[in-house]
Amino acid sequence: MNSMLPATLAQVATSDPVKISGFGVSQRVPEDLSACFAEFLRRIVPTSPAYMAARNAGVEIAGVLRDELYRNATIEVAETDHIVVGSVGKRTAIAPIRVVDLLYALPPKLGLIKAADALKMTWAVVKSRHPETQIAEDQSGVIVPRAGITVKILPCLPREGAFLVPGPPTLDRASGWSITNPIAEAATLRLMDSMYGSRPRLLLAVLKAWRNTNEVPISSFALELLAQDFYTSAPRPYALAPALVDFWAWSRKRTPATLRPPGASTHVVIDDAWHGKAKAAYWRATLGEYHVGQGKVVDAALEWRLTFGPKFPVPGDRAETLPLFREKARRHA
């Protein structure tokens, strides 16, 4: 069983809440832009119980696989056969949590199995208890719809601290396996957070909300890599609003680009298909900053709400009564 997940890696701490620091106490009706951002973060950052519920959904599916794949195991494998990764594992999810990624270590006897066969085997095992289970269209994992949340299983083969996970076959990888290192990814993000006062993770949270609201054609993982690169490239504003303005300007110059995740063997290609959305967000944020300079906090908050969606609060909570929003609602009716 020496190729199982090391216990020190599998037992990831669950008490790692995102700290909404530097914004003051919660206000029922925000009075300034800083308070609006604080309340917005409280609305989009999942609570610790929400993260725990997501993890438990993954643990349940891990148990289904364990019962079949490790039926004759002579040692306890419950703590070393799986790890929750992705946005839930790294605490970068947006509320409500919809998907939890589960890395599941296959038995050592399957060390030479092809990725496609690993997916089929995983699908067959889980389908016996969850008939709605299916293999993802991109062959990246097995999808298990649950009540309120979907578990995505990534069957893996541990390799020297990293993991082989399914990916589309290429000329270089006929078996379909690719190397990833979610442990290194999480460690890098935590180091960045400790160095910059939780700002990278908070920036990423609002960027994900912007992506979801505006259907921005860029992956959440690509935004995560860019956010980390953004903070390491130069000193950045501490306040979130000016940091966003800087990010949208910087990111359009930084991409197209090819970035390699920590500990991975393959690169993430980030194109420029999302530049138009980023440019629009930049100018709306710039207009919001102008309104703040003029003392028009409500107008500034309205610009940010159009950027992030209805969860972004407006002082006085009167956004739906203003002409700007009535016109926007009419256009989208």
Image: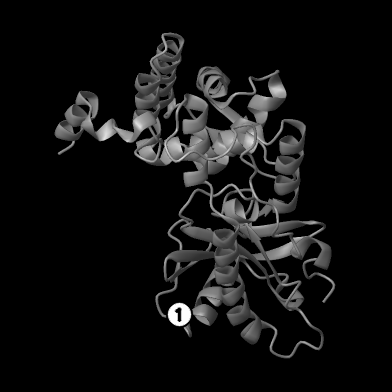
Indicate the quadrant where residue 266 lies.
top right
Indicate the quadrant where residue 23 lies.
top right
Q: Position of residue 97 (x, y in %)?
A: 49, 56
Vertical side of 101 occupied by 319: above or below: above
**Relative to the observer, which residue lies in front, 178 or 213?**
213
Is 268 displayed left or right of 191 in the figure?
left
Is 194 displayed left or right of 252 in the figure?
right
Is 108 displayed left or right of 314 in the figure?
right
Q: Which residue is denoted by mark 1 in the rendering?
A: 130
In the rendered image, is residue 82 in sight? yes
Indicate the quadrant where residue 80 lies.
bottom right
In the rendered image, is residue 174 in sight? no
Residue at the spot 22% in from the left edge and 31% down from the top edge? 321
- Looking at the rendered structure, the kind of residue marked 1 is His
Label 1 crowd bin: few (<14), some (14–19), many (20+), radius 10 Å: some
Vertical side of 158 occupied by 247: above or below: above
What is the secondary structure assignment of the residue under circle 1? Answer: loop
**Relative to the observer, which residue lies in front, 154 or 310?**
310
- Quarter holding the N terminus? bottom right
Q: Position of residue 47 (x, y in %)?
A: 56, 54
Coloring applied to the structure: one colour
Vertical side of 302 occupied by 158: above or below: below
**Relative to the observer, which residue lies in front, 177 or 211?**
211
Residue at the spot 42% in from the left edge and 29% down from the top edge? 273
Residue at the spot 45% in from the left edge and 54% down from the top edge? 96
Q: Position of residue 197 (x, y in %)?
A: 71, 33
